[in-house]
């Protein structure tokens, strides 16, 4: 099942390579914090998750899938290699004295920078439809390959909740306060912080199994140094729309349980995420 992804900077179904109009100007503002923000439990969790889920599982998609495809499609593969080495040379090195929060930021920023470069190059050689399917399809396949147990667990919990709502909706009404308390304890924002940064649950309906999460300043746009991006005059919006929005909406499309919808507010760095379980 193909997920529809609105890419605001390209053409679709044209039969020619995706167009390359001017992208949105960056308006990212990197958050700062005190001791708890930089060294607290959430910072440690985000650091570990960024290493496991982004650097180790997401990073190889650029090097071993997208770059080889670009080399095959390009007239001068050697130039592609030079450009890739140049973007890799901009990596921020993780140092011994870096805080957990800084390690997370550098891991994430390095991934976003190299992914955005690869996407901007890849879309030169394929139609918009082909480009989206390559990126979203590959990203979703890798997500399932590396995190199938976690995906199955989340979907099964959603299926159980839906079955309970169907069997006894009145009981759900009685347990609303308890369910709200549990949802606050197991705040999805805490578990997605390594991906989006700080967020807030602004709407929650336990009986309907829905929640709305607002991300005021998504980490996808704030972790990397804007001057080091492949296009320093633009936000890394291709990865935002395809790797983040596109992949998550395809993996969690509601067919097996959870449904997620991402509404990035480009050219701003905020985003609204709607979840139905």
Image (cartoon, rainbow, N blue to C red):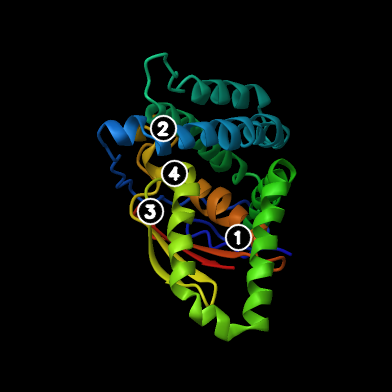
Which residue occupies the foreground of this view, 276 or 246? 276
Closer mark to the observer between disc 2 and disc 3: 3
Would you name the residue on which mark 2 appears?
A: 105
Q: Is residue 71 left or right of 216 when viewed as pictured?
A: right
C-alpha separation, residue under disc 2 versus residue under disc 3: 16 Å
Distance of mark 2 from mark 4, alpha carbons? 10 Å
Looking at marks 4 and 1 on the same chain, the residue that comes earlier in the sequence is marked by 4
| CA separation in Å, label 3 and label 1 | 18 Å
The x, y position of residue 80, in whole percent, is: 61, 27
Crowdedness near tag 2: few (<14), some (14–19) or many (≥20) residues, C-alpha within 10 Å: many
Which residue is denoted by mark 3 in the rendering?
A: 199
Dot label at residue 220: 4
Instruction: Pick the residue in front: 223 or 98.
Output: 98
Q: Is residue 40 left or right of residue 108?
A: left
Whole-percent x, y for residue 182 in the image: 48, 61
Labelled pair 4, 1 in contact (Cβ < 8 Å)? no
């Amino acid at each position: 099942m193909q997920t529809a992804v609105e890419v605001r900077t390209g053409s679709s179904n044209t039969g020619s390579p995706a167009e390359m109009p001017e992208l949105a100007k960056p308006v990212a503002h990197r958050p700062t914090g005190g001791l708890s923000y930089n060294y607290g439990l959430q910072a440690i969790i985000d650091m570990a998750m960024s290493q496991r889920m982004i650097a180790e599982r997401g990073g190889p998609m650029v090097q071993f899938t997208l770059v080889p495809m670009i080399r095959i499609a390009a007239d001068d593969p050697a130039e592609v290699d030079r450009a890739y080495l140049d973007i890799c040379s901009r990596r921020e090195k993780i140092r011994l004295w870096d805080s957990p929060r800084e390690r997370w930021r550098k891991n994430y920023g390095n991934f976003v920078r190299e992914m955005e470069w690869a996407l901007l190059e890849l879309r030169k050689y394929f139609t918009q439809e082909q480009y989206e399917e390559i990126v979203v399809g590959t990203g979703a396949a890798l997500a399932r390959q590396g995190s199938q147990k976690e995906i199955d667990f989340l979907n099964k919990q959603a299926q159980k909740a839906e079955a309970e709502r169907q069997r006894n909706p009145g009981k759900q009404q009685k347990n609303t306060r308890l369910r709200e308390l549990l949802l606050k304890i197991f705040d999805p924002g805490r578990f997605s912080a390594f991906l989006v940064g700080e967020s807030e649950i602004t709407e929650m309906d336990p009986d309907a199994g829905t929640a709305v999460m607002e991300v005021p300043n998504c980490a996808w746009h704030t972790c990397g140094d804007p001057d080091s991006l492949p296009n320093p005059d633009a936000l890394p919006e291709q990865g935002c729309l395809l790797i983040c929005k596109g992949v998550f909406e395809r993996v969690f499309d509601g067919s097996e349980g959870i449904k997620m919808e991402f509404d990035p507010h480009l050219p701003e760095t905020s985003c609204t995420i709607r979840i139905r379980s």
